[in-house]
Amino acid sequence: MKIVIKIGGSILDQDLKPIAQDVRALRERGDNLILVHGGAKMVTEIAEKMGKEQKFVVSVSGFRSRYTDKETAEIYTMVIGGLLNKQIVVALFREGVSSVGLSGIDGQLFKAERKEKIKIKEGEKVLIIDGDYTGKVVEVNKQLISSLVEAGYVPVIGSVAVGRRGEFLNIDGDRAAASLAGTIKSDVVIFLTDVPGVLKEGKVLRRLNMEEAEKLMERVEGGMRRKIFAALEALRAGVGKAIIASGMRPQPIIEALREEDCTVIEQ
């Protein structure tokens, strides 16, 4: 089974041992795994320590994101492609898992299109501002991923990308994981977050089809809306199913694959 796992930034604050143990167990049964991670929370913390104020904007479609100037893009690359990435690699190493830590820049793993102009909302106003150093993944280096997996490694990929002019770009980790999963036609993509799944009136919605997920996305906000959007992108690209689950359980990946107390989105 081919499994792509997106580890949310909130999970990276926790003990990574349960995730690493699950990766080891799944590798031992013959599954191929690829990990993608974000780390926006630590980026904000490090940037503020460096005296770099962070600005956030809301797109006309309702997605909140970081306005990333060139300096912030460099901090993003430093934190996600450096410290956070290697923390995951070391956690896997402690469990006897051979892994290779990369950013989306290495080997041009994630090529992205920089957004030249973006529309944002400020109150009731819609403004068009110059694009920042954020981008949308347009190409994934499938050959590099396949080579690492075939050699027995678990790739660990930090969600930053390289632009067409060679610039560092901040990309959305959930959508990057979806693009990767679609490129390799994974059996499943799992989004590990700090809640059990998509909630409605405090209860987990256990199973959604694509039409139901699209309608629901209009009523949810924040990070969950983005995860549903990414899940739908993955399914449209040929991924078998998408799972949104808690990364804070004793066996976060294995329990998600068992579809225990999580949200499964399928065709």
Image (cartoon, grey):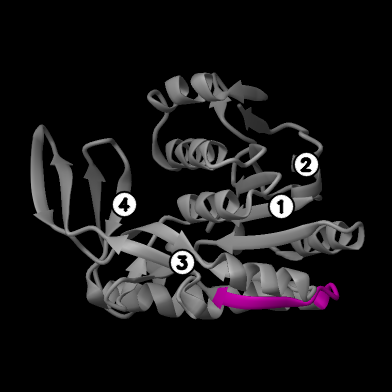
Mark 1–mark 3 distance (CA, rounded to whole Å): 18 Å
Q: Residues within 10 Å of mark 3 (few under 14, many from 20)?
A: many
In the rendered image, which quarter is residue 75 located in? bottom left
Element type at mark 4: strand
Residue corresponding to mark 3: 110
At x 54%, y 21%, the residue is 200
Residue range (magenta): 94-102
* For marks 3 and 4 on the same chain, the one whose residue lies earlier in the sequence: 4
Q: Is residue 110 left or right of residue 8?
A: left
| 26 in relation to 197, above or below | below
* For marks 4 and 1 on the same chain, the one whose residue lies earlier in the sequence: 1
Mark 2–mark 1 distance (CA, rounded to whole Å): 10 Å
Element type at mark 2: helix
Mark 4–mark 1 distance (CA, rounded to whole Å): 27 Å
Please check the rendered image and state whether residue 164 is part of the magenta-colored stretch, yes or no: no
Label pair 2/3, CB-CB below 8 angstroms: no
Q: Residues within 10 Å of mark 1 (few under 14, many from 20)?
A: many
Residue corresponding to mark 1: 3
Element type at mark 1: strand
Residue type at numbered disc 1? Ile
Residue type at numbered disc 2? Leu
